[in-house]
């Protein structure tokens, strides 16, 4: 009987070792391939599928990979992945990059103010920290406005339903 317990214990240990080895030998998907796969999802899926894929992507990205995510978002600011990436950046506290990508994404859109704030309300309106997030994105737009060229400033002013604002005038819009 004692010999049988040793064999069972040895078999379990061997099984655990094989299982552990199998897990280690399976390469984890690179952040770049995850982002490209997500982009394809955004280009070929409905909103529900994109939302599910976004949640999965948000959960899988380590803080050390956020710079890669930011760069990917900048490069793809004028594609179907732009607004989901803005969402991810806001959730991860990368407001300045989120604002930068939003400006690029909205450059070619009509009704920028409506598009931006309707999207914002839909994505963040139910959150307890909605006011704080809105303030943070506003401050990020202010940073972009301060350092932006005339085209960037025009897009940002349009997002806020204004035209031809100076930096001081825009500060009053952001921080009334």
Image (tube, rainbow, N blue to C red):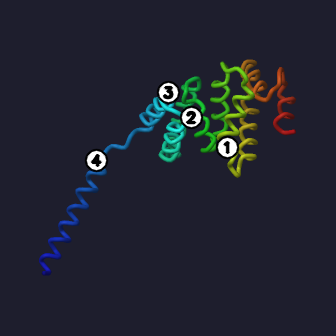
Q: CA distance from mark 2 to mark 1?
A: 20 Å
Quadrant of the drawing holding the N terminus: bottom left
Earlier along the polypeptide chain: callout 2 or callout 1?
Answer: 2
Q: Which mark is residue 70?
A: 2
Earlier along the polypeptide chain: callout 1 or callout 3?
Answer: 3
43 to the left or right of 22: right
Q: Residue at x 58, y 29 (%)?
A: 82
Callout 1 crowding tier (Cα within 10 Å): few <14, some 14–19, many ≥20? some
Please state the horizontal and vertical placement of residue 148, each as a whole percent of the image. 72, 24
Please state the horizontal and vertical placement of residue 10, each as a whole percent of the image. 18, 68
Q: CA distance from mark 1 to mark 4?
A: 40 Å
Q: Secondary structure at mark 1?
A: helix
Residue 18 vs residue 47, the one in the foreground: 47
Asked whether disc 2 touches disc 4, contact meaning CB atoms under 8 Å apart, the reply is no
Q: Which mark is residue 124?
A: 1
Q: CA distance from mark 3 to mark 2?
A: 19 Å
Asked whether disc 1 touches disc 4, contact meaning CB atoms under 8 Å apart, the reply is no
């Amino acid at each position: 009987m004692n010999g049988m317990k040793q064999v069972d214990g040895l078999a379990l240990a061997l099984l655990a070792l094989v299982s552990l080895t199998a897990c280690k030998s399976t390469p984890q998907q690179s952040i770049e391939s995850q982002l490209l796969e997500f982009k394809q999802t955004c280009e070929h899926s409905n909103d529900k599928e994109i939302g599910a894929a976004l949640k999965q992507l948000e959960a899988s990205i380590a803080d050390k990979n956020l710079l890669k995510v930011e760069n990917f978002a900048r490069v793809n600011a004028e594609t179907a992945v732009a607004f989901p990436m803005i969402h991810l950046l806001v959730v991860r506290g990368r407001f300045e990059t989120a604002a930068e990508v939003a400006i690029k994404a909205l450059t070619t859109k009509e009704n920028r103010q409506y598009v931006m704030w309707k999207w914002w309300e839909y994505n963040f309106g139910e959150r307890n920290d909605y006011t704080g997030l809105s303030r943070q994105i506003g401050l990020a737009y202010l940073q972009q406005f301060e350092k932006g060229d005339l085209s960037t400033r025009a897009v940002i002013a349009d997002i806020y339903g204004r035209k031809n604002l100076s930096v001081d005038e825009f500060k009053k819009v952001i921080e009334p």
